[in-house]
Image (cartoon, rainbow, N blue to C red):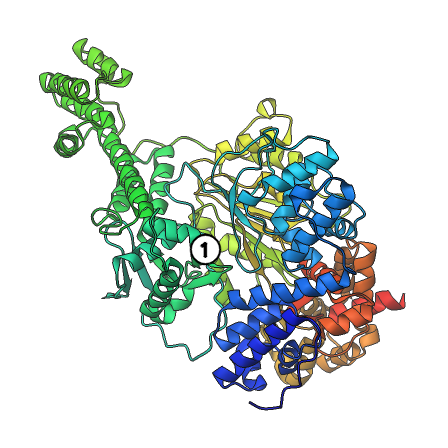
Amino acid sequence: MGRREKPITTPNRALADLVRWLRHQRAAEGLTYAQLAARTGLHATTLQRAASAASVPTGPVVEAYARGCGVSVEVALRMWRRARQEQLHGAAGGRVALAPETVADLPGLSAALWGLYSAAGGPPLRTMERRAGGYGALPHSTVHRILRGQTVPRDERQLVAFLDACEVPARERRPWMEAWRRVVTRTPPGTGVAPPREEATFREPGEEAFREPLREGGPFLVEGLFSGAHVARAQPLPAPRSGLAPGPRTGPVPPRAGALRLTVLGPVRVWRGEQPLALGSPQQKALLAALLLRGGHTATAEELIDAIWGEEPPELARAALRTYASRIRKALGPDGDLLVSESGGYALGDGDGDGTSLDVETARRLAAQADTAVSGGDLVRACELYDAALAQWSGEPLAHVPGPYAEAQRARLTEWRMSLLELRYDLDLRLGRHAEAVVGLTALAASHPLRERLRELLMLALYRSGRQAEALAVHADIRRLLADELGVDPGPELTELQQRILAADESLACPDESGTAQPRTFARPAQLPATLPDFTGRDALVARLGAQLARADGTVMALAGIGGVGKTALAVHLGHAVADRFPDGQLYVDLQGTGASPADRAAVLGGFLRSLGTDDASLPEGVEERAALFRSLLAGRRVLILLDNARDAAQVRPLLPGTAGCAALVTSRVRMVDLAGARLVDLDVLGPGEAMALFSRVVGAERVGAEREAAMDVVAACGFLPLALRIAAARLSARRTWTVSVLAAKLADERRRLDELQAGDQAVGATFELGYAHLDAEQARAFRLLGLTEGPDIPLSAAAALLDRSAEEAEDLLEALVDSSLLESAGPGRYRLHNLMRLHARGRADG
């Protein structure tokens, strides 16, 4: 289709296979490169170069090519890794990779690690750093030295990080650990050295790895080594992460007729509005249920096969899994892109605030609100919330769904319901509703005869209803049952209650709790700064982020973006918009992350604790102790925490709440990819219409309307950046003799533009300089050179030539600038500088 392909002449046989496969898939789909470019968002020349065999293309380009052709990304990336491996082998000059079992000295270990990296497809160094757990665990500079044979991992932690980065399965790690200890610490093999704790690593595009421990391991476990978003065992289910970003569509999107409603607390069902969707076979429902109950986390194919079929899967289980996933997508219709495949696994997104609901998540949220109401003394409201949570059940959880995973979850969800019922009836007794409680508790005790807590509540309800003999008969009945069935006596709580009833203990009388008593007095801080009275634009974003924050499910939302884009203004505005959903208060702190002296974490925690009512004499000394007390004080409360201007994730982690009910909003110039569980939000500049509206609102609509074309020139010169727009508008407002045309003329000169965009202590250039000051020498050099480029986008190949670095090294530098919000990612292999940022970089280069 289209231009004739050039012959494949590369000596890299794996690359030739990849190119032939890519060309075949495009031809089979009947696509020209222009049509494929429209599907992928990449330039046609980039795609054609990827299939030219001139060099090994980047992984993201291959992935986009495969997605655009509607074929397996997994197959494409597997072929790409082989091509990269063969390329690396040739570049290594015949360097021989050793198996870990044959390693006998440091050079051998170095060669083995190089071979491992090569087998992993030779990912970019910055990718290795991120896979290893973020900054600090395995710096990309260390990876570079390891691969050059200049060093080996310094300790077990760094070795595990390297194995993480190469995606070595846990079952294959023991030989590597023994090899390292054999040559570094001279420990002989076979001495009982245990590998690190086995873990399943789940990744989503652009996010840090999520690690869920599967079993205990050996002596190399270091506290914090496997830091990440672990499933909270105290919760009925993990809180869902943000919805997964689906891959690009390859066809028209049908309109949605209504939000999805999904249920697992009964039969597994899906409705769109009031219309039930056909989900197919029980095995398809088992797959859907397994993904729903993972809260948005990815499950590998092996885990899903085990979940559905257990120890005896069918011979073609993987093919069946793919078929089930395809059928579920088809059943979901326009929402089918919520089910995504990644690295051989699957995950189900949460709809990203589009109204999609899951009954178990609704029940969890209502139960958390009920707990908060109990803590605040509003028992009547707590009863209503528990009733609403229990109403989410519509029968036996996961009814008729086969498989060991469904069986285990069925038992778990049933136990959770029983716990909620016990909490609900306990409130009835505290409110004096003894007679009503007797009816329900009698029925429950009959259906769960060995559940001692139900018997305890029933005995107390009967005694307070004046039915002492019946209360004692309940104890005698369960004592007999326990002896006959289990050969044990009742627990100490039941025995003590029996003795107190026999003694007519006056303290068993109904407590004086009407449910209308004043709740416990808590300090309720209201520390949010004033919102900008002329805050303009971003309405859809505010609504979407506000809906996510208002869930109060322990959400941590991290806003990142270029300096001056309005992160703080948006966060404060958003905080005020949802403040009523956090009745226990709002905490705020400027972490001063862009300055030379960022805020001390212990001092910040001390301020928070004082705001929550802790006196100085009760403040612990250390950061960890203060963080633990902070989390304890927030338990059962609904508090919003705004952490403004953070330097990095390490500064933020101790300041986060530990339970649902609270939420944290973080702003930073750094993309916090290593802040586990956080919803990352990249804040862009305003749209042209919003930018004009902001400029008009500050200057005055009449003044702008008289010179609208000149105003459009001003807005464009400011690059739609809110800080630049406000400075320009402030200067114009302060000079009544200026026309808009005068200001437009001043800003038209690029050499003077940044000088013109300053007013008082605000300056666009100074704001950009705060981010530049944190770059290392190599990154700063790259930033300055990028300022010399022209055009909207910078291809990776052009950047590599400009920086005089290999494509991999250039990509590492550019990605570091993206993470620092000094550069934007315009697509796979393409980057973009904001026009004002380019002027700042150019000025730095000239200086």
View extreme (top): residue? 503
The quadrant in which residue 681 appears is bottom right
Which x, y percent locates residue 696? 61, 74
Q: Is residue 590 visible?
A: no
Element at label 1: helix
Which x, y percent locates residue 121? 64, 60
Amino acid type of disc 1? Gln
Q: Quadrant of the C terminus?
A: bottom right
In percent of the image, x 39 and y 39: which residue is there? 235
Instruction: For label 1, count other residues whose C-alpha is less than 10 Å away and answer few (under 14), some (14-19) or many (20+).
Output: some
- The vertical placement of 271 against 605, above or below, is below
The quadrant in which residue 845 appears is bottom right
Does residue 3 appear left or right of residue 661 in this picture? right
The quadrant in which residue 622 appears is top right
Name the residue tied to disc 1: 548
- The vertical placement of 712 against 134, above or below, is below
Which x, y percent locates residue 459? 17, 22
**Nearest the eye: 762 or 298:** 298
Does residue 706 appear left or right of residue 342 in this picture? right
Does residue 123 appear left or right of residue 487 in this picture? right
